[in-house]
């Protein structure tokens, strides 16, 4: 375990098992649909997006967006900055928007609204982790891996100021790790 991790919240095994379950569930829900596009929000969704897309046994396209609402702090800034948007044409497509975590809900809401402008057939929101107690809007995800308590977590794509993304588990940082 990394020195700055106080505890492991979700082990590698738990994450992998749950991602496969989500993949099967999405397969069931989408098996009669065509034109499926999975859009991942970089960088945080990278590992979840990759493992989930491999667990969905259906033809689909992948694309990415870069959005951030966070600077280098642990609190949302409230506004969403889109630095790269997807290149796939989404009109008539079934879009699965994938992020690592939903916290305030500001990011997912803003991106969903942006995608709706292209007239997709549907947009569903997928997140590995959800902190419902932190929501500032009415946003509900369609597929959630884990509901977690209000603790700042890192690993499996999630970062603190750019670090810890490549941990294969999700853990809670020691308070002294924030002070640096
Ligand atoms: P929201 O817009 O407040 O819902 O925040 C979503 C984004 O905030 C996610 O894509 C993450 O990048 C980041 N975020 C929220 N909570 C955490 C956390 O506990 N650890 C790391 N990043 C987080
Ligand atoms: Mg993120």
Image: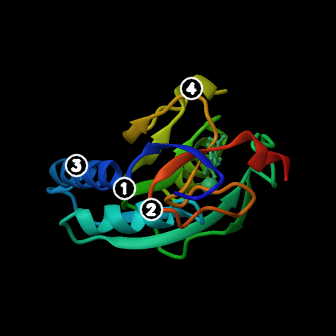
- Asked if disc 1 and disc 2 are in contact, CB closer than 8 Å, the reply is yes
List x then y, in percent, for residue 177: 75, 49
Judging from the image, what secondary structure is the residue with disc 3 in? helix
The picture quadrant where one finds residue 83 is bottom right
| Residue wearing tag 4 | 138
| Residue wearing tag 3 | 21
- Identify the mark nearer the N-term, 1 or 4: 1
- Is the residue indicated by label 1 positioned so its CB lies within 8 Å of ligand 1? no
| Residue wearing tag 2 | 168
Q: Residues within 10 Å of mark 1 (few under 14, many from 20)?
A: some
Q: Residues within 10 Å of mark 2 (few under 14, many from 20)?
A: some
Residue 36 in view here: no
Q: How is the image coloured?
A: rainbow
List x then y, in percent, for residue 71: 81, 54
Residue 99 in view here: yes
How far apart are the two marked residues, 3 and 1, measured between alpha carbons?
14 Å
| Residue wearing tag 1 | 12
How far apart are the two marked residues, 1 and 2, measured between alpha carbons?
6 Å
- Identify the mark nearer the N-term, 3 or 2: 3
How far apart are the two marked residues, 3 and 2, measured between alpha carbons?
18 Å
């Amino acid at each position: 375990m990394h020195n700055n991790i106080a505890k492991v919240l979700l082990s590698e095994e738990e994450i992998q098992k749950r991602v496969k379950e989500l993949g099967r569930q999405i397969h069931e829900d989408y098996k009669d649909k065509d034109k499926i596009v999975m859009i991942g929000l970089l960088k945080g969704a990278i590992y979840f997006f990759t493992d989930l897309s491999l667990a969905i046994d259906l033809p689909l396209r992948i694309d990415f967006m870069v959005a951030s609402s966070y600077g280098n702090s642990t609190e949302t800034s409230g506004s969403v900055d889109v630095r790269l948007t997807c290149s796939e044409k989404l009109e008539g497509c079934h879009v699965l928007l994938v992020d690592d975590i939903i916290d305030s809900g500001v990011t997912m809401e803003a991106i969903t609204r942006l995608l709706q402008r292209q007239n997709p057939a549907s947009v569903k929101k997928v997140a590995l982790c959800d902190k419902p107690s932190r929501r500032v809007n009415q946003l509900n995800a369609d597929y959630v891996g884990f509901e977690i308590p209000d603790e700042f977590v890192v690993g499996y794509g999630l970062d603190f100021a750019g670090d810890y993304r490549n941990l294969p588990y999700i853990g809670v940082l020691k308070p002294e790790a924030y002070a640096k």
